[in-house]
């Protein structure tokens, strides 16, 4: 859940998200005006998959970024429900 909070904070202070696959995790780089605002790994596979679904070739920018930013509560709810479903299986 800390990852969700960190993503929400970084979304408020950036305008581009770049996702990079690393071994067993996905690295998120939040960029604002060409400079990296925040960079951290996502180890939760459900969250990583949801972020990759929101991206186009690992990049979330422009209209896609604004949509993710403005509907982040729904995005977080969807991720939490997927996590719960995986736990119940």
Image (tube, helix red, strand yellow):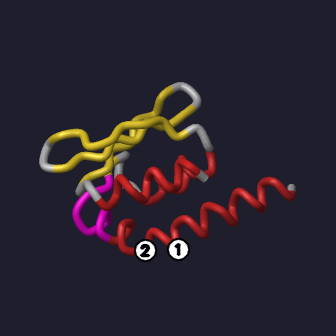
Predominant secondary structure in magenta? helix
x and y percentages locating residue 2 in the rendered image: 56, 49
Q: What segment is highlighted magenta in the picture? A: 60-66
Q: Is residue 84 above or below residue 26?
A: below
Tags 1 and 2 touching, CB below 8 Å: yes
Task: Residue 61: say if magenta.
Answer: yes
Looking at the image, the residue that sits furthest to the left is: 33
Residue at the spot of label 1: 74
* Residue bearing the label numbered 2: 71
Nearer-the-camera pick, 41 or 21? 41
- C-alpha gap between disc 1 and disc 2: 6 Å
User: Where does residue 13 sit, x and y in percent of width and height?
Assistant: 27, 56
Q: Residue at x 26, y 57 (%)?
A: 61
- Res 84 quadrant in image: bottom right
Against 8, residue 28 (above or below) is: above
Residue for point 50% across, 55% down? 5
């Amino acid at each position: 859940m800390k990852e969700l909070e960190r993503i929400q904070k970084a979304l408020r202070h950036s305008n581009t998200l770049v996702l990079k696959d690393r071994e067993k995790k996905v690295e998120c780089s939040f960029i604002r005006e060409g400079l990296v605002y925040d960079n951290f790994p996502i180890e939760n596979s459900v969250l990583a998959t949801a972020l990759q679904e929101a991206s186009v070739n690992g990049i979330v920018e422009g209209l896609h970024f604004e949509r993710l930013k403005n509907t982040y509560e729904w995005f977080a709810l969807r991720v939490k429900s997927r996590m719960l479903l995986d736990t119940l299986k």
